[in-house]
Amino acid sequence: MPSLREALLRHAAYYLEVLRAAENLYSQDRSVYKGLERINEDWENIKVGQAWTRQHADGDEPTRVMCMDYSRAGAYILELYQHPQERIHWLESGLSCLQEPKDLAIKAMYLNNMGIAFASLGQSRRAIECYQQSLAIAQEIGSRSGESAIFNNLGNEFFTHNKVGDAVKHYQRALAMVRGLNDLLGEASTLVNLGAAYKEQGHKESAFECLEQALKITRSTGDRHCEGFVLSNLGNFYSDEGQIQRGVECYKEALSIDRELNDLRGEGINLGKLGGAYTKLGEHSAAIECYERSLLLARKLGSLHSEAVILHDLGLTYRKSGDLKRSIECYEIALPIMHGIDDQHNEAVALQNLGLAYMSMDQSQQAINCFEQAIKKHIELGDRKNEGINYGYLGKTYARIGETGQAIEHYERALAIAREIGDKRNEGAALWEKGVALDKSGMHVEARANYIASLEIHSQLGDDSAELLLSLLYNKES
């Protein structure tokens, strides 16, 4: 009869293989649901196995290696299943078992994955620290594929926090590396990232070229999953550029591929994007239907993050359709989920949109409370752009209730931030709104100076609103 230690060792070894099998279902068979279902069935036993190897890793070499393997065996599937904080604990366990220098490659992988987990928590500084440590190791051991992946992840983090120039530099370095390795799928995914960054910079032609190249590569390789990913991003490009019907066509193509591959996660994502496109087209019933189907899939997969984001987007659609009560209900369901999983970025955005819904209902104090909470979150995250936008919303709310002095003060804060970060569009908006508030205060000369400065910025940007603003200015002066 085996000893207790032998029994627990066998238990840990068995459930490590269960974890590997779930990972294979996801990464090789592209069956997200089956992979997650497999983990869900045995999750408590998997956790017991991992905990035992962590506690006994100093005992012998096989247990040490097993502890390391628990941290890497389910690298992709656990990113979906685990809360990022729990994922970090597992990776820290793996790191504690490493023996340098022979385990340097594994250390680089753990640090990169920890960076992804910290990024999911909105902890940008710690994510970047992990990526940079991982990058130093990858460069030391000459892992070009590792370097390219980390440059992409660093680019994603900079892009998320509106440091688009830094993002472009990192994506360009990643692209040079994957091309040197002849990694076609890596090249395609990097081109998608670079295209999104170029678009944010206003380089639309370069952005479109990146996406077209990526689509051509994926079709030449026959990788349907990657083709669907590129089509989905091409849909984003068209939708953002006002070619919404072409965006819908791309999302539908991507959705068809997801269903062909039984990729429930991809299907849920593209249903959500399709819902967003229908919202832009004013087809609110079709949008709500897409979001509700996406929500069912998120709940089926047990993805709290996706559930919260879809609820938020559903709330946005209800608000645009005029159903403010249901809009507020969606935000109020989404916010506790976001708070519970420590998704600070989306929580801040949801607070902002809840504030806008309250503002539309003339519930000014509730709106002010939401915008102030959103500002606090954005300050914690270091998101200056959205901090400034919410100061602008506070200005509008105070202006509505006749507190013009408070309105001007908040517009000035919004204006200072926009100038600090070079956000010309929001600088122009803040100048105009501040001018309106100054006008109401009887400060007509100062108001006119703000109107003219705003108009100049909108004209420089080639903004369609410039003509409207010019007409408004003319009407004010006539």
Image (spheres, rainbow, N blue to C red):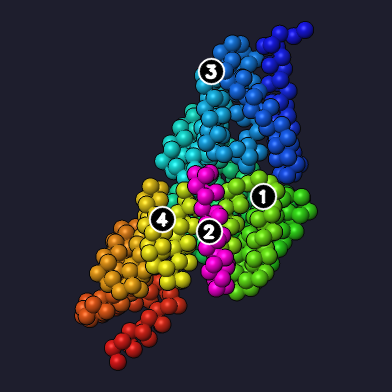
**Could you give the CA–CA distance between mark 3 and mark 2, rounded to whole angstroms?**
47 Å
Query: Range of the magenta residues?
Result: 317-342
Residue kind at label 2, given as amino acid type: Tyr
Q: Amino acid at mark 4?
A: Ala
* Mark 2 or 1, nearer chain start: 1
Quick one: label 3, few (<14), some, or many (20+) residues within 10 Å? few
Residue for badge 2: 331
Chain-order first, disc 4 or disc 2: 2
- Secondary structure beneath dot 3 equals loop
Q: Secondary structure at mark 4?
A: helix
* Residue at point 56%, 32% (across, down): 109
Residue assigned mark 3: 99
Q: Which mark is residue 299?
A: 1
Give me the C-alpha separation between circle 2 and circle 1. 17 Å
Gap in Å between the C-alphas at discs 4 and 3?
44 Å
Residue drawn at the location 67% of the way across and 69% of the way down: 286
Q: Cα distance, mark 4 to mark 2? A: 13 Å
User: Answer yes or no: do the residues labelled 4 and 3 have beta carbons within 8 Å?
Assistant: no
